[in-house]
Image (tube, grey):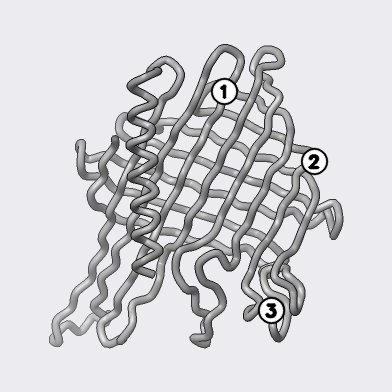
Amino acid sequence: MKKTLLTFVLLFALTAVTAQEVATDSTKLWTRKGNISLLFNQSAYNKEWLGGGTSNVAGNFGLNYDLNYKKGNVVWDNKFILAYGLSKIKGDNNAVKTDDRIELNSLWGKKASGFWYYSAYFNFKSQLDMGLGKDGTRISHFFSPAYFQFGPGMLWKKSDNLSVNFAPAAAKTIFVHKHFTEFGPSFGVLKGDSSRFEFGASISAYYKFNIMENVSVENRLNLYSNYLDQPQNIDMDYQMNVVMKINKYLSANVALQAIYDDNAIKAVQVKELFGAGINYAF
């Protein structure tokens, strides 16, 4: 785990330096922005407290980095997301993972007419650390599962804060380690296999706006239908991030993610995180 985190830190540092050099050489072509957040939550009770409760402490790290290119009729938007969180309850020997996500989105477009662009997109999603089921068994780890999506399409982009991409011929591949499929399917990958290929249609939407001064809401939605197997069962991944800035370095954040993927579980998965802490934009 430590080696994995170190690798991503080094990769991010290299990307940031490269982006800085690119921005210096051609400021009119490339724009970049990033945000690092460290959120903390704590509840503490002494032994005389009669209201009930268990002392606990939690922390979440988040990184968002955008590197975008625009020249003439060509746009190329790239977004890297990294999130990791732990919670420790008094009396428990081990900390519990509360967040774990790594994601890369890349969207290229060439203007067709008005707000419309011919496009091609790439999306990668995975996690950094091991995941445990309710019974304590290991159900996932780094690059297992790992999701890849890519395909051509049409992009409607009104601004950097509002866009929708439709890809009617999109490929999707899911990878898991074989030890997760030894006794049965896992994340849609059949027993004994290590990957699953899908072909279908994808819709990705992005919308960011300000509710009021210093309060921004970022929304991301991805829908995918597999033509090859039950196309009516649409995979959904919705993410919302609300940032309430206190000052340049302090903020409160609310993060919500809702996932539906009947290959993994036939129910909606919901995750909500709230915390206050350090927030640094660069």
Task: Please tell me which of labels 2 and 3 falls first in the chain.
Answer: 2
Q: Residue at x 31, y 46 (%)?
A: 36
Element type at marker 3? loop
On screen, residue 122 versus residue 27, left or right, reads right
- Residue type for callout 3: Thr
Write down the quadrant of residue 19 in the picture: top left
Q: Residue at x 52, y 87 (%)?
A: 135
> Vertical placement of 6 versus 32: above or below?
below
- Residue type for callout 1: Val
Residue beneath disc 3: 181
Element type at marker 2? strand
Task: Please tell me which of labels 3 and 1 falls first in the chain.
Answer: 1
- The percent position of residue 116, horizontal first and vertical second, equals 68, 20
| Measured Cα–Cα span from mark 1 to mark 2 | 21 Å
Task: Please tell me which of labels 1 and 2 falls first in the chain.
Answer: 1
Residue beneath disc 1: 75
| Measured Cα–Cα span from mark 2 to mark 3 | 28 Å
- The percent position of residue 157, horizontal first and vertical second, equals 60, 24
Q: Residue at x 33, y 71 (%)?
A: 87
Q: Residue at x 26, y 75 (%)?
A: 56
- Residue type for callout 2: Ala
Q: Are marks 1 and 2 in contact (CB under 8 Å)?
A: no
On screen, residue 260 versus residue 60, left or right, reads right
- The percent position of residue 153, horizontal first and vertical second, equals 74, 32
- The percent position of residue 8, horizontal first and vertical second, equals 39, 54
Q: Are marks 3 and 1 in contact (CB under 8 Å)?
A: no
> Vertical placement of 138 versus 163: above or below?
below
Q: Where is the N terminus found, in terms of image quarters?
A: bottom left
Q: Where is the C terminus found, in terms of image quarters?
A: top left
> Vertical placement of 259 versus 208: above or below?
below
Residue beneath disc 2: 169
